[in-house]
Amino acid sequence: MTATLLRKTPVAATLLGLALVITGCPNGNDNDNTGNSGIPAVETAVAGGSHTLAVGADGSLWAWGNNAFGQLGNGVPGTANNRRIPTRIGAAGNWTAVSAAGSHTLAIGTDGSLWAWGLNAWGELGIPGGNRSIPTRVGADTGWASVAAGINFSAAVGAA
């Protein structure tokens, strides 16, 4: 099974044994013609309101789509910084889970730490202050097992 959306040059990856063709946002700007160094096999892929993220089998984090509120996590918010191709977020391969909804993103690090970035208009990031354009740690706990992002809220479950 292959899923394909609009994209001039699809990037192929493998997700749970299925062929997955990764595509970008067809109506956004894309100033990143060099940011994709080759997405590895994909463990998890999630879609937010207008952005997509994937965790590679090597623990790397990739993001593409709309970046109006910094939800991609690349440190440069604004629609002029949308990405049509998967762009690696940070250099570390330390991610195990990711969730996205609306205009924010949540992730769990390999150490069980909780991270959030993007729109924070209703406190959905779980941290005080405004929007974040890079992954920002939420608290000091390291026992997080899963995360779920909603339109204007977030939820996380600790390990038993």
Image: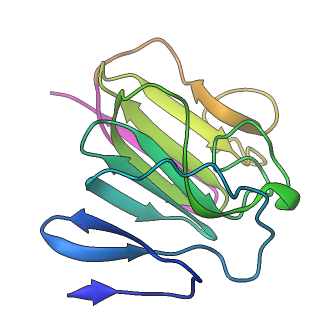
Q: Which residues are magenta?
A: 144-160
Q: Nearer the viewer, residue 131 or 42?
A: 42
Q: Residue at x 32, y 50 (%)?
A: 40
Q: Looking at the picture, does residue 134 appear above or below residue 25?
A: above
Q: Height in image: 115 above or below 122?
A: above
Q: Residue furthest top?
A: 140
In this view, the residue in front, 134 or 106, is 134
Q: Residue at x 74, y 36 (%)?
A: 75
> Which quadrant is home to the N terminus?
bottom left
Q: Position of residue 18 (x, y in %)?
A: 18, 75
* Overall secondary structure of the magenta section: strand
| Quarter of the figure with residue 74 | top right
Q: Is residue 25 above or below residue 137?
A: below
Name the quarter where the C terminus is drawn: top left
Residue 10: image x %, image y %? 47, 77
Q: Position of residue 47 (x, y in %)?
A: 48, 67
Q: Is residue 148 visible?
A: no
Q: Is residue 44 magenta?
A: no
Of residues 104 and 52, the one drawn nearer to the viewer in this rendering: 52
Q: Is residue 23 left or right of residue 144?
A: right
- Specify whether 52 is left or right of 59: right
